[in-house]
Structures are given as C-alpha cells and as structure tokens.
Amino acid sequence: YNLLKRMLNMKADTNAIDNYGNNFLNRELMDARQMLNRPDADFNDWILLKQLRSVFSELIKAGADPNKRSESRESFAYNVRNEKYQLY
C-alpha cells in the first residue's frame, strides 16, 4: 500500500495500459481475485476487503477511470459487476 501511495504521489499515470491491455484497476482486480479466492483467505474481521477497497478507492481518487477500456479488455466497472464482494 505504501508503494502505491508513493507512486500516486509521484503522479503515476493511473490510466496507463500494460502490454496485456490491463489498466491499473483491472490489474488490481486480478490481484484481488487471487487473494479473495484463496481457500485460506481470512474474512473474520473483513480486514482483507477493507484493504482491497482502500486500494481501489485510492486509484480512483487519483484519477483511474473505472469505465476506461482497452482494445483487448473491458472496463474495470464492467469486470467488477459480478464480483462476489463489493470492491469499490
């Protein structure tokens, strides 16, 4: 989280697209799914979800567009609509 904050403070482009067509939000969604779908994911105090939501919130506050698509990927808003947990 500290690295993310530092990158955002340095004005990282939150809408940049990687070589696979993922923007910041879609890449974070893939990482979040890996954490949430682990059999040993701890939901006792919901801290994992709180932390993930704060990451998405920081990205959006810094200008990441949830509706931005790329040539090969749907938008984050489209991809997150059927998630089991509300992530933002």
Image (spheres, grey):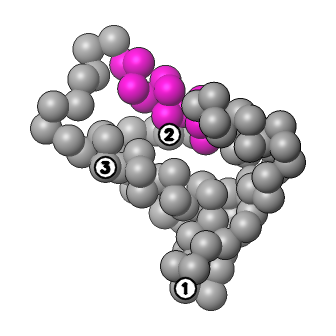
Q: Earlier in the sequence, mark 3 or mark 2?
A: 3
Q: Earlier in the sequence, mark 1 or mark 3?
A: 3
Residue 2 drawn at (x, y percent): 63, 29
38 in relation to 71, above or below: above
Residue 23, quarter of picture: bottom right
Q: Quarter of the image for the C terminus: give it.
A: top right
Residue 72 numbered mark, or none: 1
Q: Indicate the amino acid at tag 1.
A: Ser
- The region drawn magenta spans 46-57
Q: Quarter of the image for the N terminus: give it.
A: top right
Work out whether residue 57 can be spotted: no
Label 1: element kind: loop
Locate residue 79 relative to residue 64 in the image: left or right: left
Residue shown at 49%/24% (left/top)? 50
Query: What residue would you read off at disc 3?
Result: 34
82 in relation to 68, above or below: above
Query: What residue would you read off at disc 2?
Result: 87
Between residues 2 and 71, which one lies in front from this camera angle? 2
Q: Indicate the amino acid at tag 2.
A: Leu
Residue 29 drawn at (x, y percent): 47, 53
Gap in Å between the C-alphas at discs 1 and 3?
21 Å
17 in relation to 3, above or below: below
Q: Residue furthest bottom?
A: 71
